[in-house]
Amino acid sequence: MRQPPRILIVDDEPDMCWALKSALQIYNYSVATATRGTEGLELITTERFAVAFVDAKLPDLDGLELAALIRQKSPQTAVILISGYFYPEDGVISRGLKKGLLFGFLAKPLELGEVRAIARRAVEAGEGGDQYNDTNSPS
């Protein structure tokens, strides 16, 4: 029997972790959460994740810095940056996408339908081997 895809959520707001976890578990994803970047990095080194949702502003690590570390330690993990500070057209986001650090980006407040859709696309892209391309940002 096939294991459900694993998703990691790294956000310093416990309520955001809970909401995302609840929304994704309904669709049979196995979800782990961390409220600090270093905690998320520890999980990445000990477990395999298909997708990681990473907050751009964490108390101990910058979200893009964490994305780079995740991609270095776990190249198969699709990283989706979430933020209430940045928007899709910001240079920081476009550079992260172009460098292959990010699979996609979602602006807070999050719409759960978009969260589920990008998680599904990331899992499917990882299974198909075409994980990072220019079509992964939500429209």
Image: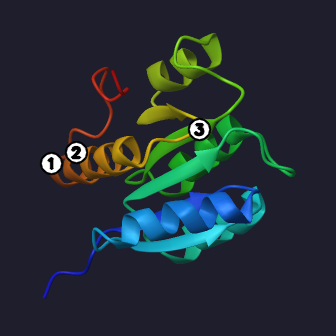
Residue 87 sits in which quadrant?
top right
Contact (Cβ within 8 Å) of mark 2 with mark 1? yes
Amino acid under disc 2: Ala
* Residue beneath disc 3: 109
Name the colour scheme.
Answer: rainbow
Q: Label 3 amino acid?
A: Pro
Query: With 48 as the anchor, is 27 left or right in this view?
Result: left
Q: Is residue 45 above or below residue 90?
A: below
The residue wearing badge 2 is 125
Three-letter amino acid code of the residue under disc 1: Gly
Residue 34 image position (x, y, % from top left): 67, 67
Q: Give coordinates of residue 122: x percent, y percent.
A: 31, 47
Is residue 41 at all visible to an observer of this figure? no
State the residue at coordinates (16%, 81%): 2
Marks 3 and 1 sit apart, C-alpha to C-alpha, by 30 Å
- Give the SS element for disc 1: helix
- Please say if the residues under marks 3 and 1 sit with CB atoms less than 8 Å apart: no
Query: Which label number is shown at residue 93?
Result: none
Q: Nearer the viewer, mark 3 or mark 1?
A: 3
In the image, 9 versus 26, the foreground residue is 26
Task: Please state, as top left, top right, bottom left or bottom right, where the N terminus lies in the image.
Answer: bottom left
